[in-house]
Amino acid sequence: MSDLLERLRGRGWRMTAQRRVVAEVLDGEHVHLTADEVHSRAVDKLPEISRATVYNTLGELVSLGEVLEVATDKRAKRYDPNAHRPHHHLVCARCGAIRDVHPTGNPLADLPDSERFGFTVSDVEVTYRGTCPNCAAA
């Protein structure tokens, strides 16, 4: 059973076959699938699942705070089940591959008071960009 499934069951989320399949598709490390990719993989497991059901389920998971919606560029939004461990993203500028990274240090502390312009900063999103090994080898 995936960590996401365990979290959802612990919350008492009604686990239909369609919801279970979407959660199973999202299970894993460094998972950052688009809604269409989630649907494609879900259809392999449950052929009758509709695109609308996948989109609705993803929206519910984001609303619950169990999945993060990630937009790293002008490409489609991606869904990240690693919602409970603070992390940043490393993105390939060529193919769009995304990896979760956990750098040391506190990026919030790196923003000097003079650059906060009176804001009370509550969250930081850092995206590292580069070229993945597959694209670099091509």
Image (cartoon, rainbow, N blue to C red):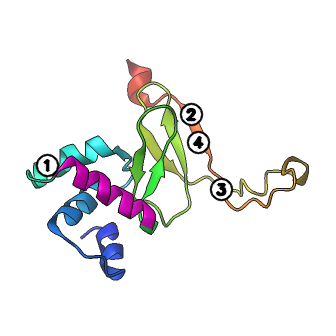
Amino acid, disc 3: Thr
> What residue is at 30 percent from the left and 51 percent from the top?
55
The span shown in magenta is 50-63
Quarter of the image for the C terminus: give it: top left
Magenta region includes residue 53: yes
Amino acid, disc 1: Val
Amino acid, disc 2: Arg
Distance between mark 2 and mark 3 Cα atoms: 17 Å
User: Dot 3: few (<14), some (14–19), or many (≥20) neighbours within 10 Å?
Assistant: few
Give the mark nearest the N terminus, 2 or 3.
Answer: 3
Mark 1 touches mark 4? (CB < 8 Å): no
User: Does dot 4 land on a helix, a strand or a loop?
Assistant: strand
> What residue is at 44 percent from the left and 60 percent from the top?
82
Q: Nearer the viewer, mark 3 or mark 4?
A: 4
User: Does dot 3 land on a helix, a strand or a loop?
Assistant: loop
Q: In this rendering, would 127 be left or right of 134?
A: right
Mark 2 touches mark 4? (CB < 8 Å): yes
Provide the residue designation for mark 2. 129
Quarter of the image for the N terminus: give it: bottom left
> Looking at the image, is 56 positioned above or below residue 2?
above
Mark 2 touches mark 3? (CB < 8 Å): no
Amino acid, disc 4: Thr
Give the mark nearest the N terminus, 1 or 4.
Answer: 1
Provide the residue designation for mark 1. 43
Provide the residue designation for mark 4. 127
User: Does dot 2 land on a helix, a strand or a loop?
Assistant: strand
Mark 1 touches mark 2? (CB < 8 Å): no
